[in-house]
Amino acid sequence: MRYAELPLHYGKAPYWLFRRMVALGKAISEVVILEYGTKGFLERIADPFWFQALSCVLGFDWHSSGTTTTTCGALKEALNESCEQYGLAIAGGKGKASKKAPEHIEIFSERLNISDKKACEIVYASRMSAKVDNAALQDCYQLYHHCIFFDEKGNWVVVQQGMNDETSYARRYHWNGNELNDFVEEPHKAICCDEKRNAVLNLTSKRSRENKKVAIDLVKESPEKLKKEFMRLGSAQRTLENWNQRIRNESLVMPKNINWNALKHAYEFQPKNYEEFLSIKGIGPGTVRALALISELIYGSKADWRDPVKYSFAVGGKDGVPFPVKKRVMDKAIEVLSDAVKQAKLSDYEKLQAIKRLKALVPD
């Protein structure tokens, strides 16, 4: 199979296509949930190969950024109306809807009889996954879509997507709560994109652990001292130029503005770790980047500047570009989807068309 680029496509999916996607998505989801339970369904949504294959089976263009937003939208409409029946719901969405994820979680938590404690944990997971991919991972992709899938037992997965304003290409981030050990260190199930970038500030990497420790130590000291360090580094043009040369001349300069009120609040709060620091309201990409640069250039604690993307939006390229084909994973995804389609309550014609789209994923 050849890999596909994922350009940003404006507009909406045609009504006739979206209605078909909702119906087919509902039928397939019912079979998967019945066969594997809600936890098994969520695990597959978190799998970038299975998610991509599902979007193709539903009939959407797999080379479009709308693959993510429209597939999530179709599943949201298909499952939320009868969430009590499935024991599962989807919060968030594209644009303004993404900001309403906490509100949606509260509403569906009541319908699913999820405890207040579990509901708060899901809300926190929603907020932190978005905060991490916008601030702790600075890869030039700004989030514009965020969906969190969760079940009545409190299991959750996140599928969110960012856009690069310069290239108009997308990048998708998958999270699986059941495989998560730390929100700020190697938290992703997968990051999908068709390009690897230089000079990506990756504070979710294990290699950035010491950099984050120094940043927390700085935050715990007087904000006035931090301002002096910021001014000191901002005036050291030679140091920054040398640093930019070291990372292949792709500039990631000191931010012009830092939220000093948020840093003052962080100082008063005295966060125990980087996750607590990042969760503070007002701590954004600029503040995070400034602390990372100060930690590295003044105190010698290096951050990881390598792009963590590991998957293309396709299953892989048969020539190994951009990534080798994951045959075993691909075969399993196709097997599960094929069985689900065959068992789904669909007409013979609909099943035949879905199977044809599924077979198109198989490399020659």
Image: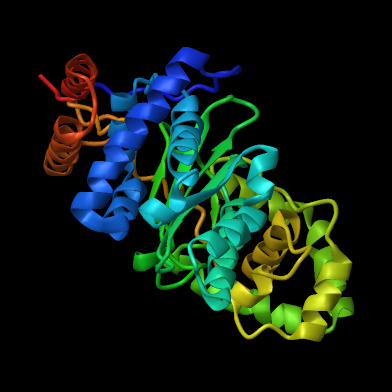
238 to 50, vertically: above or below = below
**Residue at position x 19%, y 26% in the image:** 319
Observer-nearest of 193 and 180: 180
Left/right of residue 281 with respect to residue 131 in the rendered view: right
Q: Nearer the viewer, residue 239 or 303?
A: 303
Q: Which of the image's four quarters has the C terminus?
A: top left
The type of colouring in the image is rainbow
Horizontal relation, residue 78 to residue 298: left or right? left
Can residue 131 be seen in the rendering of this structure? no
The vertical placement of 340 against 183, above or below, is above
Residue 349 at least partly seen: yes
Front position in the image: 62 or 214 = 62
**Picture mark count:** 0
Residue located at (53% from left, 65% from top)? 122
In this image, 307 relative to 40: left or right?
right
Q: Quadrant of residue 317?
A: top left
The location of residue 117, given as percent across then percent down, is 55, 78
In the rendered image, residue 43, in percent from the top left (x then y), is placed at 30, 54
Indicate whether 38 appears above or below 98: below
Image point (67%, 49%), residue name: 100
* Relative depth, front residue between 10 and 357: 357
**Residue 80 position in % (x across, y down):** 49, 45
